[in-house]
Image: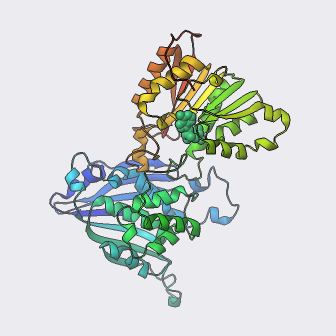
Amino acid sequence: MLFTITYTGENPTDLGYLLHKNPARPQSADLSFGRVHVFYPETGPERCTAALLLDMDPLDLVRGRRASGGIFDYVNDRPYVCSSFMCTAISGVYGTAMSGRCAKKQELADTPLDLSASLFMLPCRGGVILPELLFEPLGYEVQVEESALLDEQFPEWGSGPYINLTIRGRVRLRDLLNHIYVLIPVFDRQKHYWIGEGEVDKLLDHGKGWLEDHPEKDLIARRYFKNLRSLARSALDRLDNGEWAGEALPPGNDEPETTGRPRLNTLRLEAVFNVIKKSGAGSVIDLGCGEGNLLRLLMKEKTFTRVTGVDVSRTALEHARDKLKIDRLPEAQQKRISLFQGSVSYRDKRFRAYDAAALVEVIEHLDENRLDTLEALILGDARPGTLVVTTPNIEYNEIYGISRFRHGDHRFEWNRARFQSWAGEAARRYGYEASFEGIGEADENLGAPAQMAVFVRVETPGSGPRSLPCA
Ligand code: SAH
């Protein structure tokens, strides 16, 4: 599948700066469903074209996921057409350009330029009027090339349901990319990943500044969500109320989309579970347990005789209670688990006497200047034998095309160096040793999407007295 962008201007190769891809150096990267290549077929004095080629392996699409058992798993148009896979590739490869950042040529990134873009083999079952309906209101000139007749012997069958689409306009590059990112799925409605409420946030984030005024916004929302009316309604309500997401992704939806591989959430919980199990712990406290996903895993393992969840949010605890079906557990099981409301910002005797503790995606919800207190409370006062802390790796946000934080309530997100220096320092201060691991598929330069620190206690008590707030 091919997607090209052409810039006609004074220094056309500036396109390389804007896309953060060097015109002199073709680049390739592995995605979970294939390989993506970026190269420049044309770098003349008047025009420069960047091409994104997505080379999908049809077998990769089936591998590692529960197949439906039908022939469709193996014989389908997915590897050959512009679909949501292309959107994933675009946000992966051009994520920074989509956010509009360009350290070297910010002014150019902020300026409408003469750009054109072509998408090859775009499914267009809504009739050829769809490209005009979608792109003309955004100021583009639209050119459509229909595919050949399905069978020359039977011209009445018409042409195939795919088009090559070229749009031309004077737009900022970020706008062009966001238009395409949102509108490809409007043409091709088969999303390769699960569509949940987080998808509404994504639509609003990428549609910011143009979708609310688009005359076809109803059609866009309906088709974007594959006619899942409740999500389309929620998107339209939020559009009409002028609310913008991206600032407020729900927890756990920080990875944009998965492709048959386990979600980052699952990988994270498994990583934490494995560390705790390997530590030999019998009792575990999950601090900031949310809806209890880690607790559920821990409860399945008999070696954990005491499992406790703590959260500052009563609603989260109620959800956890429901999800874990605590009231319906046999008595022996009920004795193993307990939940209570509490805050990791206040000293609490109930945090003490656990072999292991977890802080999974919690620290980034606290103000950075509260972390000293957190360290003192957990490492200094509660002193579990093992503490596992996970947090997003902000470097990876570039791949997600997220320009700031992954969630509206995050007070900070750290790169690997910052996280490791914080954890290393805290460990030294309180007699622990810290080690680090990435969680999720790592990028060569940006690391893994999530990062984990494992603190193992090496000294018994003795972190001198401190004056701390008390619950
Ligand atoms: N650990 C869970 C939830 C992560 S979301 C998981 O991985 O699924 C962050 C959670 O931290 C939320 O449930 C939030 O209510 C909780 N939280 C935020 N500040 C807290 C504090 N000061 N003390 C305890 N929990 C807190």
Instruction: Identify whether 471 is placed above or below 232.
Output: above
Q: Nearer the viewer, residue 55 or 389?
A: 389
Horizontally, residue 438 falls left or right of residue 209, namely right
Instruction: Identify whether 208 is placed above or below 268.
Output: below
Q: Is residue 323 visible?
A: yes
Q: Nearer the viewer, residue 249 or 268?
A: 249
The quadrant in which the N terminus is found is bottom left
Q: Is residue 123 visible?
A: no
Residue 456 place in picture, x, y as percent: 57, 19
Q: Quadrant of residue 131?
A: bottom left
Horizontally, residue 357 falls left or right of residue 89, namely right
Residue 339 place in picture, x, y as percent: 69, 35
Instruction: Identify whether 239 is placed above or below 132.
Output: above
Q: Residue at x 47, y 20 (%)?
A: 426
Residue 105 place in picture, x, y as percent: 21, 50
Ligand 1 positioned in quadrant: top right
Horizontally, residue 26 falls left or right of residue 394, namely left
Q: Nearer the viewer, residue 433 or 287?
A: 287
Q: Residue at x 72, y 23 (%)?
A: 282
Say how the picture is coloured. rainbow
Q: Residue at x 29, y 73 (%)?
A: 139
Q: Quadrant of residue 271?
A: top right
